[in-house]
Amino acid sequence: MQLSHIIWGFFGILLAYNIKLYMDSKVQYDIKIDGNSISINLQGKSIGNSGLEVACKQFQDYVNVTKLEANFNLNGLTNVQTLLLTISRFKRLQELNLQLGNNPIGNSTASNLQALLIQLQNLESLSLGLDNLFTHQGRSQIIKSISEMKKIHTLQISLINTDLGGNQIDTLLPIAEMRQLKSLELILMGSNLTAPSTKSLQTLLYKLPKLEHLVLNLYGNRIMVDGVDDLSAGLYHQRQVKSLELELYFNNITSNGTETLMSVTGQMTNLTKLHIGLEFNYIEEQGAKHIGKALGNLQHLRDLSINVASKNFGYLGYEAVLQAIEKLPILDSLQLIIGVNKCGARGADLLKKVLFKQNKLKTLILDYTENYIGDAGATFIGEGLAFQKALEYLRVVLNFNSISDRGAIDVAKQIHSLKHQPKYIDLRLSQNKISDIGSKEVLRYLSNITQEVDFVELELLGTALTNATRDDLVQTYKNVKNLNFIVDTAPPSYWDEQ
């Protein structure tokens, strides 16, 4: 009896092993190989350690690769040694984008990653995602090794949700020794940074070589006014940059802090690209005026993104920003995120004038969520869109704006009538009073251009669309190529209560 159990147990193990071999041979991941470039994106796929081994087998023999992009964030990985050994085979690697964040990887892996970086001495570009990984000591070892890589001119480090409070931010200071660096991106979202932490960022920016491209993403920290002062003092030493991206969402920044920051930004007269995110701070009308004043000095801009969504920022601040944009040289790309600012139809009319001047945009992103523009404002925005002659990418978000059928149809009609149709169109009209008639007309206009564009997306959530019409529209347009229609319904009584 015992012998039969042993035999059956052995048979079970053998069967399981062969099933694993079979499954491994069948598992295929989305790996793109183009010459000496490999790209693999498995973020959030929960592949685990065994899945990682399978993935590595599919690209481990391409030893002459010079560019590797590998995203393994959120995969339940505890052991990435196979991956690190695979990458170590790529002796000619010049560009590496490796994202390992939010995996339960032990701190001992930090030394293994450090050893890998020491071997990759031909790297010129490195993007490393260490979100919520390792101890302070482990991260310090890795960044110290990076600072000693003599050929790297482009560096991005992501430490999202990693505690860098107190003096732990000093981990980044060795980067200042990279005298060949031209581009630096630090993604420090939710990293427990406060005003004292920014002293180290000030020191880093002071000691760094003169950069051409700088990104500082401090989203969701608490640097406040004193922190902005320190950050601005550091930025002063990088006034020569041509490209600057600052994300300062939810950092308790006031109009005084905005004044300090924008006084330095206004001195960066070489800027061709400026992306600044100050949403949900306390910048108020006066802070917006400082933004407008700084923009007036930046006469080489080609790419501008302004995010000032905030409930304490009214029409006068909005007007200062828009009038400054109107006076800028012709832009290639414009992104305006000015939600919950109550700019109203008058503000939409001002935007129309800006779009008349800035009429050669290739990329246009407008987010006017909850600005009470109504039908008149929607019509103004539609008329502004009609001036555009070169759009390739268009995104318009008009959610929560008391728009009815007339305004929604006007916007869709103007998009339909563009002489130069963008390749990508995204129109969002959710939480407005758009009825069955309006929804049908909007869809009719947009569906008529699907053969001319690569993709059209329409969102109509929380409108006055009835169930019957919704079902009819979904059925009618579900097979239309290049069209994505996102819809639900709200009962008619919903609007009676508003």
Image (cartoon, helix red, strand yellow):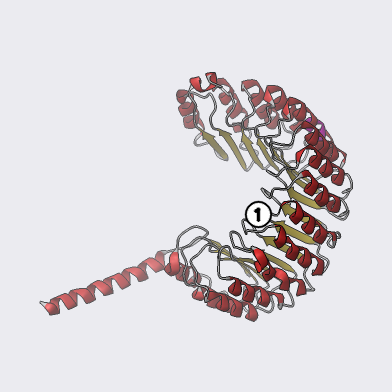
Q: Is residue 353 magenta?
A: yes
451 or 28, nearer to the observer:
28
Residue 185: % across, % down: 71, 62
Rendered image quadrant of residue 369? top right
Q: Is residue 472 above or below residue 234?
A: above
Rendered image quadrant of residue 22? bottom left
From the image, tell me which residue sits under label 1: 221
Residue 135: % across, % down: 56, 71
Residue 315 in the figure: left or right of residue 104: right
Residue 443 in the figure: left or right of residue 151: left
Residue 485: % across, % down: 54, 35
313 or 388, nearer to the observer:
313
Q: Which residues are magenta?
A: 351-355
Quadrant location of the C terminus? Answer: top right
Rendered image quadrant of residue 460? top right
Magenta stretch, main secondary structure, is helix
165 or 465, nearer to the observer:
165
Is residue 360 in sight in this rendering? no
Quadrant location of the N terminus? Answer: bottom left
Disc 1 residue type (three-letter): Asn
Residue at 57% across, 78% down: 111
Residue 37 in the figure: left or right of residue 202: left
Residue 379: % across, % down: 71, 25
Q: Is residue 208 magenta?
A: no
Q: Is residue 129 above or below residue 301?
A: below
Query: How many neighbours does mark 1 have within 10 angstroms: few (below 14), some (14-19), or many (20 or more)?
Result: many
Callout 1: helix, strand or loop? loop
